Structure formats: structure tokens, C-alpha cells
Image (cartoon, rainbow, N blue to C red):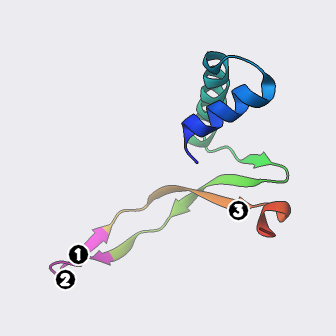
Amino acid sequence: MIKNDLVNRVAEISDVSRVKAALAVDTILDTMKNALRQGKRIELRGFGVFQVRDRKQGIGRNPKTGVEVAIAPGKTVRFKPGKQLRGI
């Protein structure tokens, strides 16, 4: 499923135009992105939790040459599915 599929489904279910449905989907996604950038936790009951976590420093390897490469520490987004989603 892609973003366009979500927009079509929202428009179909809520009986609004595709333009308004696209605005609603964009608003939700932008709000979630901004919250994650601020390090906030997003909990959608019955679906799951999005959380920003620290990623530790490590050493990787270039598969083509075999040369070791340092991987810098950073942040990453993790998703933990909710109970209802785990049963799928």
C-alpha cells in the first residue's frame, strides 16, 4: 500500500474529495514526522508505537571490498506493533 492508496481509501470512507483526503493524510504524516524529530513517542492504540532510539557506534564492512568502515552513532525510528497487530 502506498500513500495514494491511503488517500483514496480516506476519500471513499469519509465521502470527501480526494483533495481534502490528501490534505488530511499529509497533515497526519507531517505531524508524526515533526513529533519524531522532536524525540517524542507516538502511540496509536491497537496499532503500535513509534519511538526514536539511539543507535550505537559500530563497525561495518564494505561487502564489495571487505574494508571495515566506522558507523557513526545516531538516532533511528523504531516501531513496536500493538497486540491487535501482532496477531496478524
* Residue 26 image offset from top left, x and y in percent: 60, 27
**Label 3 crowd bin: few (<14), some (14–19), many (20+), radius 10 Å:** few
Q: CA distance from mark 2 to mark 3?
A: 33 Å
Residue type marked 2? Gly
Residue drawn at 42 percent across, 62 percent down: 73
Residue 49 in which image quadrant: bottom right
Q: Pointers 2 and 3 in contact (CB under 8 A)?
A: no
Q: Which residues are magenta?
A: 60-70
Residue type marked 1? Asn
Q: Secondary structure at mark 2?
A: loop
Q: Is residue 61 magenta?
A: yes
Residue 9 in which image quadrant: top right
Side of 56 where 12 appears, left or right: right
- Give the numbered dot on residue 62: 1
* Image position of 60 with respect to 24: above or below: below
Residue drawn at 38 percent across, 74 percent down: 58
* Image position of 85 with respect to 9: above or below: below
* Image position of 20 with respect to 2: above or below: above
Residue type marked 3? Lys
- Give the numbered dot on residue 80: 3
Quarter holding the C terminus is bottom right
* Residue 68 image offset from top left, x and y in percent: 23, 78
Q: CA distance from mark 1 to mark 3?
A: 30 Å
Residue drawn at 64 percent across, 37 percent down: 6
* Residue 76 image offset from top left, x and y in percent: 52, 56
* Residue 36 image offset from top left, x and y in percent: 60, 42
Q: Secondary structure at mark 3?
A: strand
- Identify the residue position indicated by label 2 in the image: 66
Residue drawn at 50 percent across, 55 percent down: 75
